[in-house]
Structure formats: structure tokens, C-alpha cells
Image (tube, helix red, strand yellow):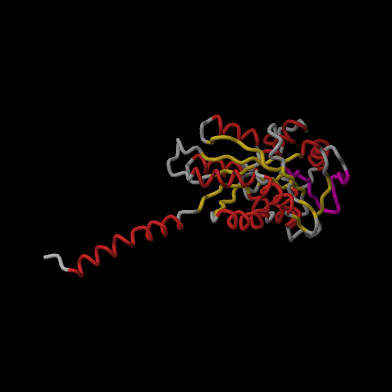
Amino acid sequence: MINRRTVMLAAALVASIPILATSVSAQDKSIVVSSTTSTQDSGLFGYLLPLFKEKTGIDVKVVAQGTGQALDTGRRGDADVVFVHAKSAEEKFLAEGEGVRRFPVMYNDFVLIGPKSDPAGINGMKDVAKAFQMIKEKQAPFISRGDRSGTHIAELAIWNKDAGIDIERDKGAWYKSIGQGMGAALNTAAASDAYVLSDRGTWLSFKNKGDQQILVEGDKRLFNQYGVMLVNPAKHQNVKKDLGQQFIDWLISPEGQKAIANYKINGEQLFYPNADDKSA
């Protein structure tokens, strides 16, 4: 026989279902963004993500890797959004059907860092290809990230295309590939008085500069564009397409673009928003 207590218990359980659903929904309001070490190491995400969460309530969990690894994370469906800086690799990702659409977000530039003693004699040069040629001629120590990151891809393009040096064939003991991120590469270069290519944002936020300084900057070949893409939910059903697209929409909105421009270290702007440049 069903008594009054059983009915009340059943009613209480039914009443709790919306609360449980709301709780689960709140717990799920998060996304994974696979991005570059430069957006993390520069402190940009530490500045942007609290602003985005305040606006939307969405938590963003960042997996910081080199661009090649970040795109591979997207290919496995282990991220909802990829935010990287190697346009050719991003276009390949789209051509494979792994991403939905690429949106330009911002740019900064690469800089060639080296010791103040400057054994290759490149300080103040505006031709980065010539600077690389002189580093090789002098066999001056050079640290490569060697991690398929956007910075590594840019470095290889300077060696192989711009400087006309087949670095894989012509490298010697002076050229050290470490297979690690930007912070590790800068630390290794500082410890060994070596040259290294870095994105400007990570360099400005880097604490252990030691005797290192910017020696070459301003060459148009050092331009560094960032793009963002939603991982294709048609290929990866676990992708949170609505939440991920909210993050992308915020980044390229006037509010998000202003936030990117406002991020500075010691008064120096690290990234320049350009979502309105559809060719970037």
C-alpha cells in the first residue's frame, strides 16, 4: 500500500530533478582551448579569461602547446577551440575538415634575441635573413624550439626560404634543437649565451633575461598573426560548439578586441587586435 510518506518522498525526488539538472549544467559550462605557449607565457590568457568568464560565466581551460601540437589536440577532439599562430598550418587543419572556420584575432611580431656580446655582429640589423646567415657563418650558438610550434615554423622559413640555408643539412654543433616551449628556449639561450627567435609577447613577460636583449626586429618577415577556430563538431561530437563559438565571438567582438589591446606589460602593448582584417 502506498502511504503518504512514500508519495512525499517521490514528490521530493521529482522536485529535485531540475536542481540536479541545473547543477550539472553549471558544472559543464566550460570549454577547452588548445593554444600556443606564447598566449599563455605572455600572460595574455591570465588577463583575458577572467573578463570573458565575468561576461559569460564560461570557464576556459587552456592547454598550452606549440602550434603543431595544439592543432593535433584539436584533431583528436580533445579541445573545443584552437587558438594558434601559423596560418599555413591552420589552413591545412581546415582543409582536412578538422575546423569550422578560421577567424583572425590579433598580431604581434617575432624578435631575434641574443647576448649583448653579440658574437655574430647582428645588433641593429633590419634584415633577419642576413642576420641568420651571419649566425651560421660565425657558428654562433643558436637555440631552436624544435617543437613544430608557430615560432619554430617561422624560424625554419627564415633559414630555408629567406636565408637560403638548408638548416637540417647544414646545422652543426652550434645549432641546438630542444623540442620545448618558448620559456624553455629563452632559458636555454640565456644560460648558453645563444641566439633565439621569440615572439615579442613572451620575451617582454620573460623574467630571466640575464645578458640577453633584442638584437634584430622590424623586418616584415617577422610578422606574427594569430587565428582562432572551432573544432569541427561534425567530426568530434563531444565539441561544445555553442560555448566554443561564444568564446570566438567574444575574442573578435569590439569588447574582446579592446581587451586584447589593453593588455600591457610595463606600459608596452603586447598584441594588436585585427579581427576586422579578413585577409590576415
Question: Foreground: 81 or 112?
Answer: 81
**Residue at the image point whose x is 77% and y is 51% from the top:** 269
**Residue at the image point whose x is 56% and y is 51% from the top:** 63
Q: Position of residue 206 (x, y in %)?
A: 73, 57
Residue at the outermost bottom position: 5
Q: Is residue 158 left or right of residue 252?
A: right
Q: Position of residue 166 (x, y in %)?
A: 71, 32
Question: Foreground: 93 or 150?
Answer: 93
Q: Position of residue 266 (x, y in %)?
A: 79, 59
Q: Position of residue 170 (x, y in %)?
A: 72, 35
**Residue at the image point whose x is 85% and y is 49% from the top:** 118
Residue segment shown in magenta: 107-124
Residue at the outermost front position: 4
Quarter holding residue 165: top right
Above or below 114: residue 92: above
Q: Quadrant of the C terminus?
A: top right
Q: Is residue 280 left or right of residue 228?
A: right
Q: How many marks?
A: 0
Q: Quadrant of the N terminus?
A: bottom left
Taking the magenta stretch, the answer to whether it contains residue 177 is no
Quarter holding residue 68: top right
Taking the magenta stretch, the answer to whether it contains residue 118 is yes
Q: Is residue 249 left or right of residue 163?
A: left
